[in-house]
Image (tube, rainbow, N blue to C red):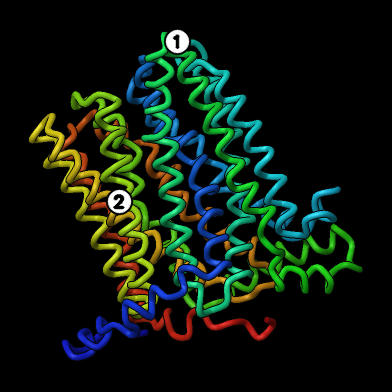
Amino acid sequence: MTGAPDSLTETASALKPRASWREAMAVYLQPRVLIVLFLGFSSGLPLALSGSTLLVWMRESGVDLGTIGLFALVGTPYTLKFIWAPLVDALHIPGFTKVFGRRRGWLVFSQLLLIVAILLLALTDPARSPLFVALGALLVAATSATQDIVVDAFRVESLPESEQAAGMASYVAAYRVGMLVSTAGALFIVSAFESTGLMRSKAWMWGYVVMAAMVLIGTVTALLATEPEQSARTEAATSAESAFTRVTNAAIGAFSEFLSRKDAWAALAFVVLYKFTDAFSGTMTAPFVIDLGFSRNDYAAIVKGVGLAATLIGGFAGGYLARAYSLPASLWIGGILQAIANLSFSWLAIVGVNQWALALAITAENFTSAIGTVIFVAYLSALCKNPLHTATQYALLTALAAVGRTYLSSGAGYVAKATGWPLFFMICVVVAVPSLVLLMWLQRRGHFDGLGEKSPNN
């Protein structure tokens, strides 16, 4: 379906699966898909270390809700990464590029920088120096965003069309697993260190040190992977050009090609808003659960157990939807599901401290968020038609997608403080409406006609 349905018959036809479940799941064991899966874990791991896990650490250290909400701003590198993405597309890392190749060299280099950044954040103290915590978190976000630039380009370039849906589902599911490890897993590790008699501040420090060591999973994956053929061909074709020329071509080509498309600005606004409902509520989920009266371990146990299962199932369900249904139909399904899932937290706020209610809310959040993210990644990948500047163009789109999580969500703490938790999560449902209105408008304008077809330059 590429336009708005004119009848119930067209709507029913659009929602009819185009592939069986068995066919859609058959490609998940392909080696390239498995590589993407582990790289997804590597990308998801650091996000919570400068986000929700850090917020729990700050809340336990006595930092007020308003300041915690403002800490969403440390995610600024995720929104600005398109600025240095042309450097990743065009420049060589001395030693790394020669040994590992264009994409793999940047992968290994960015992961080593990420390990150093996490270790520096581990040495800070939220109770004494929030400014240094912010600087450490900003450095983690910057190195993490750089890794994301490379991983996204590697995924798009290495997977053939028949494996893209499975690759996206595997990537997103593993991304969420990485986030769960750095939230629930990190909280368990901190508690384990505390149980040995360590002071809370030292326990948090060593918890972050363990998380830094887990980045090596992505490094080993990068070493085992092979350089994408598209990347190798591009490297050979541009080897005679100067570094300045390569960077300039990557930057100008990515922006001019996209902005020349019909309704480009509306599409960019849709990219910003589609995951906003998820981001707005997600910013305050951890502080909400702690404020409600749950212990750190209660929250961690449910997130690690029920949340992990919901994430995995939701990721693969999203992969099935992306492969079996049309792109606009799957976007509708994902957008509506991730919005109404917020009502489970409103219900939890009314029920109070009830582990079954918390388990249900966490399940709904993780399941629907994973579905929405997989479908959204499918849309972003479809927008990147020209492989000559994959990293730059995809970085631009994902940076815009991070605007909702970083800037639009920065006031979430003040909204929660003013309205109370039940009404706050109802507001999180309402903020999904603008993205659905844009989806309807783009659908009527034929935005999805031929979307995802390869550029003639490929």
Q: Residue at x 42, y 75 (%)?
A: 26
The answer to which image quadrant residue 443 occupies is: bottom left
Q: Are marks 1 and 2 in contact (CB under 8 Å)?
A: no
Q: Amino acid at mark 1?
A: Leu
Identified at 73% across, 68% down, the residue is 231
Q: Camera-side residue: 125 or 104? A: 104
Q: Is residue 353 above or below residue 254?
A: above
The residue singled out by tag 1 in the image is 198
Identify residue for label 2. Answer: 309
Q: How many marks?
A: 2
Determine whether the residue tagged by mark 1 lies in a helix, strand or loop.
loop
Residue 141, percent across and down? 56, 39
Q: Residue at x 69, y 82 (%)?
A: 457
Q: Which mark is residue 16?
A: none
With respect to residue 305, does 431 lie above or below?
Answer: below
Specify the amino acid type for callout 2: Ala
Could you say where residue 181 lies in the image, as x and y percent from the top left?
A: 43, 39
Q: Is residue 95 visible?
A: yes
- Of labels 1 and 2, earlier in sequence is 1
Q: Is residue 73 left or right of residue 151?
A: left
Q: Nearer the viewer, residue 31 or 434?
A: 31
Quadrant hosting residue 369: bottom left
Q: Position of residue 245 (x, y in %)?
A: 84, 63
Element carrying mark 2 = helix
Quadrant including the C terminus: bottom right
Q: Is 195 drawn above or below residue 270 in the view shown? A: above
The extreme left residue here reads: 351
